Every structure is written in C-alpha cells, then in structure tokens.
Amino acid sequence: MKIYVDGENFRHGVASILRAKGVIQNSKDLAQFPLRKLLEDVTDVGHLNIVYYAAKIKMPRGYEPTAVISDRADEIRGFNRKWVADLIAQKVEYIKAGYLKVKQSEPCAHCGHQQEVLQEKGVDVRIAVDLISDSHHEDAKTIALMSSDSDLIPALDRIRRSGVRIIYICFANSVNRAMSATADETITIATRKVEQLYQESL
C-alpha cells in the first residue's frame, strides 16, 4: 500500500505532541522520527511504500531578505538536512514538491506593521496530482493519505468515485472531520504512540 504524507503537516503534528508532553522544548529539537515504524504499526501493513512531500525555500528574484528571514531560512535548511537523512535511512521516498515563499503578514490590528514570513505553497497541489495519477493504475485498490489539508478533499472525492478505497491517517488530537467523511476509513494515531516511538528511537 502507498501512503502519501504531507511533510509539514506531519512534522508540525509530531512536534506539537512532543512539546505538549514536555519531551522536547522546541520544534528544532526534533531532528528524527521513526515514520516508517509508526505507519506500519497503525496500518498493520509491512513494507509500505511511503512518499513524503516537503517544500524547499525559494526567494523571489532580486529580493534581499531581512536578517530575520535569512537566519530563519538557514535554520530550516540545516534542520532539513538531518531530517531528510533520517527519512532516507528509513527508505522513505522524499519529494520536494513546493516552496516556502516570502510574503507579507497581515497588518497588525494595533499598529498596522507587517512582517515578512515564510509560507508553504504548492505541496498540496503536487500531492493531489500524484493521488489522482496513481489511482488510475490497475493495481491501485487502496491509497492512504496523511494530511489534514482540506484542499485535498476534491481529489479524494474523485478518487473514491473511481472505485479506489481511501484511508485517511491523522493524529487523534487533530482529526479533520471533512477529510474523515470523504475517506472510506480513518486511522487515528494516539499521542502516547507518538511519544513512545520517539523515545524508543533515541
């Protein structure tokens, strides 16, 4: 079975759980996680084909980043090197599918000041394209998705109507009800499972 993982969604979810449990202090402390073990445990399927989608940083042409954005970009690149190396060691396919683009934040309600922030773009589009494309293969009877991005619902609905079974995988503390309603089956991952596997991997 093939599982499509929204990387930023997954990493944010794991970090949020581990911070709440007091296991890590900051998202930057999370340099590895046994993704394959987690997914094979919760699906009870061995030798999964896992595809992990993530964005790369892209600065606009001619743009001179502020010191804050430049430092943040360097921090993300350094972190990603460790994270990606760990995924590859687990035989997880890693796909750079979108970009972290610089944009202006919403104006502050009090002073009107805007900050530059990095925003992910394009990952959901690539996942949707791959989901639909792969669902047309004759051997595609079941596909699984680990993402709570509602933008993927139209793609899931189309795939389901074509006769392919859809499994939605999510953390128990962040179930997207609309995604769950679109899928044939929902698998929730308990927070204690995340903590346990992370501790065992250290």
Image (cartoon, grey):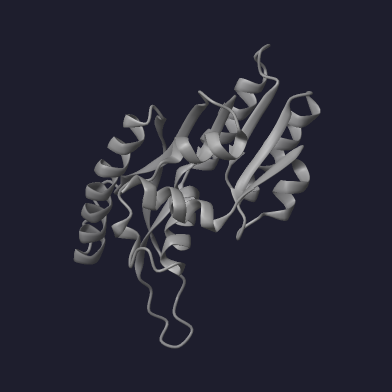
Q: Is residue 53 visible?
A: yes
| Vertical side of 166 occupied by 80: above or below | below
Of residues 110 and 62, the one nearer the viewer is 110
Q: Residue at x 42, y 58 (%)?
A: 15
Please say if 135 is above or below 64: above
The residue lying at 61 percent from left, 22 percent from top is: 133
> Residue at point 65% right, 14% down?
137
Residue 52 appears at what percent x and percent y? 45, 35
Residue 148 visible in this rendered orientation of the protein: no
Would residue 33 be found to the left or right of residue 42 on screen?
left
Farthest bottom residue? 110
Q: How many marks?
A: 0
Residue 85 lies, with reference to residue 18, above or below; the image says: above
What x and y, as percent, mark residue 147?
57, 45
- Residue furthest to the top in view is 138
Q: Position of residue 33 (x, y in %)?
A: 38, 45
Q: Is residue 142 left or right of residue 128?
A: right
